[in-house]
Image (tube, helix red, strand yellow):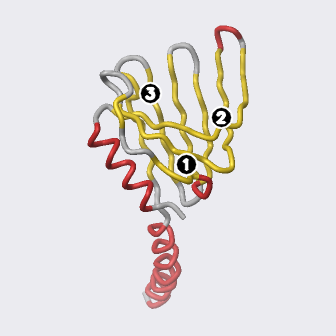
């Protein structure tokens, strides 16, 4: 019994600092509808990188953005009658991979701006505020 108690005490002492560090790292992993019925985007935010995976009926776009490269974020604006966007301005440029399976094409580009899509202005504004709070 005493050995078990000692083992649990040691395990707790080791686990607490690890858990505290893990909670301090911001994570934002969410799949968002980019255009109802037409596409989705998965957004993953870690302490140093924002990854955006958008899937459309014609293909997909994969973007990897180091947080330190985001220089500004636009206020939400209406892109179509259903999509609100925020644009992230980047310096230096980030990698974007476009895949079009129908023509067997994969293109890799360096881009100085990426966009996140939302179904309403409130969600776009909340995402902008969240990202701005985690920059630099």
Left or right: where 44 falls relative to 92: left
Residue designated by label 1: 50
Which disc, if any, is residue 5? none
Residue designated by label 3: 40
Q: Please determine whether, in this image, residue 28 is positioned above or below residue 63.
A: below
Q: Please determine whether, in this image, residue 126 is positioned above or below residue 82.
A: below
- Marks 1 and 3, how far apart at CA: 16 Å
**Could you tell me which residue is drawn at 49 percent across and 65 percent down?**
25
Q: Front-most of 3 and 60?
A: 60
Circle nearer the N terminus (1, 2) = 1
Q: Classify 10 Å Cα crowding around label 1: few (below 14), some (14-19), many (20 and above).
A: some
Which disc, if any, is residue 96? 2
Give the position of the N terminus as an image quadrant. Answer: bottom left
Are discs 2 and 3 less than 8 Å apart at CB? no
Left or right: where 45 falls relative to 91: left
Q: Front-most of 100 and 67?
A: 67
């Amino acid at each position: 019994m005493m050995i078990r108690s000692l083992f649990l005490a040691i395990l707790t002492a080791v686990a607490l600092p690890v858990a505290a560090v893990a909670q301090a790292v911001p994570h934002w992993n969410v799949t968002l509808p980019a255009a109802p019925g037409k596409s989705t985007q998965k957004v993953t935010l870690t302490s140093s990188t924002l990854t955006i995976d958008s899937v459309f009926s014609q293909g997909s776009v994969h973007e990897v953005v180091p947080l330190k490269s985001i220089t500004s974020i636009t206020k939400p604006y209406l892109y179509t009658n259903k999509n609100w966007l925020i644009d992230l301005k980047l310096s230096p440029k980030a990698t974007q991979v476009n895949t079009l399976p129908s023509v067997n094409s994969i293109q890799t580009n360096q881009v100085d701006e990426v966009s996140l899509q939302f179904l309403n202005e409130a969600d776009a504004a909340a995402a902008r505020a969240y990202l701005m709070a985690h920059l630099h």
